[in-house]
Amino acid sequence: MPTKIFPHTERIAAPHGAEHISLNQVSARGTILIVVLQVECYSGAKADERPVRFRLDDTVFFIEEVLDQWYGPDDTFFKVRADDGNLYILRRDQSIPEGTWSLTSFRRLEREEKSP
């Protein structure tokens, strides 16, 4: 089960293998929870073309659909729907060769009940 996000809590994705991360920092907007984000990509015509799955802490999410993709000056953004039915916006910083990933946005969607 994915980690629940509570009101007045920010989630910041830390690079995989990051050291010296302090958890539960208090900011003006509330508590900041640090999570580790790892993204696996499909490589077709170019390397790391699009994300196919990602891990937040110990939970793996498979990407069911890339809903949108757009570019910033140094970033590529992917709006995706994961296998938990929720929406995520993943950002890849391309200003450095490693292209670090971060979780920019999360939206919990209500699942529709399937009638028998």
Image (spheres, rainbow, N blue to C red):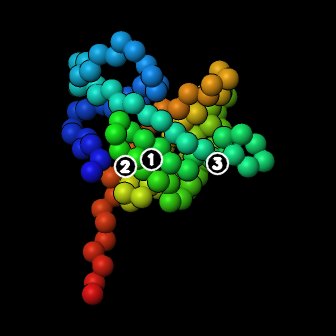
Give SS at disc 2: strand
Mark 1 or mark 3, earlier in chain: 3
CA gap between label 1 and label 2 equals 6 Å
Task: Mark 1: give few (<14), some (14-19) or many (20+) Cα within 10 Å.
Answer: many
Give residue 19's position: percent from left, percent from top.
40, 15
Give SS at disc 1: strand
Q: Which amino acid does label 2 sit on?
A: Arg
Q: What residue type is labelled 3?
A: Tyr
Give residue 7's position: percent from left, percent from top.
21, 38
Instruction: In the rendered view, tell whether residue 67 sits above or below residue 93.
Output: below
Query: Which tag is nearer the camera, tag 1 or tag 3?
Result: 3
Which residue is denoted by mark 3 in the rendering? 42
Which residue is denoted by mark 2 in the rendering? 107
* Dots 1, 2 in contact, CB < 8 A: yes
Position of 93 with respect to 26 (left or right) is right
Residue furthest to the right: 45
Residue 116: which disc?
A: none
Task: Work out whether residue 15 or residue 85 is closer to the camera in this orientation and state it.
Answer: 15
Give SS at disc 3: strand
In terms of image quadrants, where is residue 98? top right
Which residue is denoted by mark 1 in the rendering? 88
Mark 1 or mark 2, earlier in chain: 1
Task: Mark 3: give few (<14), some (14-19) or many (20+) Cα within 10 Å.
Answer: few
Q: Is residue 57 visible?
A: yes
The residue at the point 35 percent across, 30 percent down is 35
Give residue 48's position: percent from left, percent from top.
66, 40
